Amino acid sequence: MLLELRGVKKHFGGLKAVDGVDAGLAEGEILGLVGPNGAGKTTLFNTICGVYRPTAGEIYFAGRKISGLPPSTVAGLGIGRTFQISRVFKQMTVLENVLVPQGLLFYNQPWRSLWHRPGLAEAEKARRLLQRVGLAEKVGLTAAQLSLAEQRRLEIARALALKPKLLMLDEPCAGLSQEEIRAFVALVKELRQERLTMVLIEHNMAVAAELCDRIVVLSYGKKIAEGRPEEIQRDPAVIQAYLGEEEVERPVRASIR
């Protein structure tokens, strides 16, 4: 397993935001993380990435225990992520936004800073990443001048600049039009061809079903279901978590759409 969660908990006082989650992710796999609002999905992301220290449980990445490590260390080990609310550096140019995470990799070996500064080679790498996500014509704009869909693509480019073994996407389709969602799905499929491992938080079940090999469902911090997309869409516990007990007998595709 590339990523393994063993009984992971994150409590905030009496609030059990994540409550004993076990999960695993194989290399090259796309895992969907779904659940109603407040289910603990982003909290689990933040705990994996080092924003939060787990209250209990262990997290392993590529065989190494990463529970409680700071975010910069986790990122340097090969976990890149995007955010539910876009966190681009809005006053920087699109190109500069991608150069920032490249600097994390560069200065992870402090001795290099003694005689070298990132320059043309690093800028060219950044331009290639921007071309990869469809932003080649936007390099000179500030991030504030981009649309929401373009800012989400920029976040993906920044994450890819870390040369990640694992890419974590937090609701990347939120607020996008159907056309923009289709373009995002196409981008993820292209990344998949490169055997990039991904975890995707997504409320749009159709998107999750199209992209993900497996789906884990959270409700009130607990894992209530795990399986292939077609299994999850038929699971009464999943339907109940989304829509309430009275909806369990309804056709699944109609009720979770």
Image: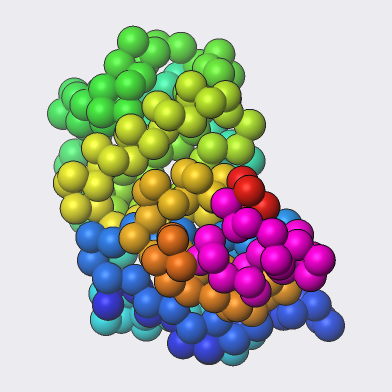
Tell whether 79 sits left or right of 85.
left
Tell whether 154 sits left or right of 13.
left
Q: Is residue 121 above or below residue 35?
A: above
Can residue 184 be seen from the camera position used here? yes
Q: Position of residue 210 (x, y in %)?
A: 39, 47
Which residue does the image show at 48% across and 22% down from the upper left? 179
164 or 178: nearer the eye? 178
Q: Quadrant of the N terminus?
A: bottom left
Q: Position of residue 3 (x, y in %)?
A: 35, 73
Magenta span has 236? yes
Q: Is residue 214 above or below residue 116?
A: below
Q: Position of residue 64 (x, y in %)?
A: 30, 81
What segment carries the magenta color?
A: 232-253
Tell whether 210 sits left or right of 179.
left
Which residue does the image show at 35% across and 19% down from the upper left? 135
Q: Is residue 157 above or below residue 226?
A: above
Total numbered circles: 0
Characterize the magenta stretch by its predominant secondary structure: helix
Which residue does the image show at 33% across and 34% down from the upper left? 187
Which residue does the image show at 28% across and 40% down from the upper left? 189
